[in-house]
Image (cartoon, rainbow, N blue to C red):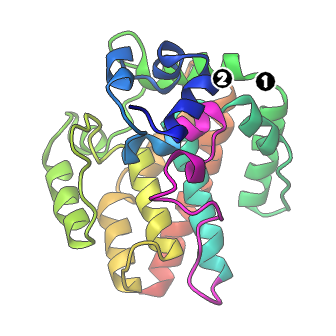
């Protein structure tokens, strides 16, 4: 029996087959769900516009991710990582595109990237971005890009970077969801983990957070976002790539200064 959150997501997507297509997995996989798996929540949220708090109220508050008290910088970092995780997980829904179109910015590099993302969102429609996301990250057989740490660092999937990541996730008490087929070194999952570290959802010292970033994010994710920015099939996602590249560069500098 499906729970209310999954039923809402299926209705919003237009059916089980449509939901599966939007998030790039098989229809039987979605049909087997009784609730949205934890590792699929962000993708389903992006594809349907149903909030993570409605999809999995047992895991997510309906309020924005809380930051450590008195630390607005970490709150902003957490939200930036969550935005990137959402856009990498699945194509944004029409509702999310409308929200992105309302983004504002300033004269900083990151501010300009927000302005460019807002313009890109205002200049497209959900169906077009859904096809773009499919061509970039899913494809027939494989997409134009493979957003996995193992692939970027070794040229192959499911290699040693993934095993090292799993060990470090276990140290934070973060476990792989049963029956999950998505390796944890997917860029969206790593961005979600970084959001949890920055916002205080996962308990970790500043040093542990820096170590995780330098081991599992810094060596490759900036290159991925650069590749997204220059990808043949990218239009809307070119702005996503530029935002991600700028943000990772800022994070690298900040962690360097924190040493």
Which residue is disc 1 drawn over?
124
Q: Earlier in the sequence, mark 2 or mark 1?
A: 1
Mark 2 surroundings within 10 Å by alpha-carbon count, few (fewer than 14), some (14 through 19), many (20 or more): many
Which residue is disc 2 drawn over?
129
Is 29 drawn above or below residue 112 in the view shown? above
Number of numbered labels in the structure image: 2
Quadrant location of the N terminus in the rendered image: top left
Q: Residue at x 42, y 15 (%)?
A: 139
- Label 2 to label 1, Cα distance in Å? 7 Å
Is 71 drawn above or below residue 197 in the view shown? below
Q: Quadrant of residue 182?
A: top left
Q: Residue at x 29, y 47 (%)?
A: 184
Magenta residues (range): 44-71
- Foreground pick, 133 / 253: 133
Is 209 drawn above or below residue 120 in the view shown? below
Kindly state the secondary structure of the residue where label 1 is placed.
loop
Q: Quadrant of residue 164?
A: bottom left
Q: Is 104 positioned to the left or the right of 42 in the image? A: right
């Amino acid at each position: 029996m499906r729970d209310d959150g999954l039923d809402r997501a299926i209705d919003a997507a237009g059916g089980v087959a449509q939901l599966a297509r939007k998030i790039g997995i098989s229809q039987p996989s979605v049909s087997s769900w009784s609730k949205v798996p934890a590792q699929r929540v962000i993708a389903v949220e992006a594809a349907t516009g149903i909030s993570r708090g409605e999809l999995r109220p047992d895991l997510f508050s309906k309020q924005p991710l809380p930051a450590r008290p008195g630390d607005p910088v970490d709150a902003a970092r957490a939200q930036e990582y969550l935005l990137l995780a959402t856009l990498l997980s699945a194509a944004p829904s029409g509702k999310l595109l409308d929200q992105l179109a309302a983004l504002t910015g300033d004269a900083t590099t990151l501010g300009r990237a927000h302005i460019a993302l807002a313009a890109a969102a205002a200049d497209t429609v959900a169906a077009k971005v859904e096809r773009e996301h499919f061509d970039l990250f899913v494809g027939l057989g494989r997409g134009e890009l493979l957003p996995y740490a193992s692939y970027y660092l070794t040229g192959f999937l499911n290699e040693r970077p993934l095993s090292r990541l799993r060990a470090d996730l276990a140290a934070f008490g973060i476990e792989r969801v049963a029956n999950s087929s998505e390796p944890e070194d997917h860029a969206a999952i790593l961005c979600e983990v970084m959001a949890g570290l920055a916002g205080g959802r996962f308990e970790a010292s500043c040093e542990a957070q820096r170590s995780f970033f330098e081991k599992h994010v810094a060596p490759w994710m900036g290159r991925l976002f650069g590749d997204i920015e220059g990808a043949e099939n990218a239009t809307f996602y070119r702005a996503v790539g530029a935002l991600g590249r700028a943000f990772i560069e800022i994070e690298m500098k900040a962690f360097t200064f924190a040493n």
